[in-house]
Image: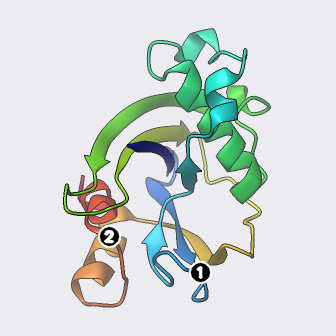
Amino acid sequence: MRETVSAVFISRKNKTLFSMKRQDYLSVFPGYTSFPGGKVDKSDRESQKTAPEKFSDSITDIHWNALSREMSEELHFDLNDHQDDILEIYLLGTAVTPEFNPYRFKSYFYIVVLDQEYPFVVDEGETYSSEWVQAESLFDRYNRGEVLAVPPTVQMIAT
């Protein structure tokens, strides 16, 4: 079973979260709303880098490495370079694909609390649009059929 990590960025000041709409031409969940993240790679497991001491009780070294790499790729935001901007990080929850699915994933969703909304620069090859939004507003849009999202993402938004 492969592992994935996602960052649910929260702005403490604005009480908003950062979400992205995937490009319509992607082969996996095109047009769906998601959080930035991706697969844990072999390099993340083999890296000698460790999570910063102030976060070491909240995230494993492997997940820190994967999350940092993915945020650099997707948002041009290296967690290692922005440690002072991160107020806290903690595991929100996990989701596992159903047994009938031939491709199995265990997904880890981490809350990453920032003081304020950060002007991320998204990878336009993967992201159609992005926004800082109130969770309740995003959940309402989902319920009205205006937003597509997989069940684990909906559950994380509702939490």
Q: Is residue 31 visible?
A: yes
Position of residue 16 measured from the top left corner of the image (x, y, whole percent): 46, 58
The residue to which callout 1 is attached is 26
* Residue displayed at 29% across by 59% down: 152
Q: Residues within 10 Å of mark 1 (few under 14, many from 20)?
A: few
Q: Picture quarter containing residue 63? A: top right
What amino acid is at disc 1? Leu
The quarter holding residue 155 reads bottom left
- Point out residue 99 in the picture as x, y percentages from the top left corner: 19, 55
Residue 150: image tag = 2
Q: Is residue 11 visible?
A: no
Above or below, 63 against 77 in this view is above
Callout 2 crowding tier (Cα within 10 Å): few <14, some 14–19, many ≥20: few
Q: Nearer the viewer, residue 96 or 144?
A: 96
| For residue 84, side relative to residue 90 (left or right) | right
Between 23 and 11, the one lying in front of the other is 23
What residue lies at 51% left-to-right and 38% top-to-bottom? 113
Residue at the image position 72 percent from the left and 66 percent from the top = 122
Instruction: Name the amino acid, label 2.
Output: Val
Position of residue 20 relative to residue 53, above or below, is below
Q: Nearer the viewer, mark 1 or mark 2?
A: 1
Q: How many marks?
A: 2
* Closer to us: 82 or 6: 6
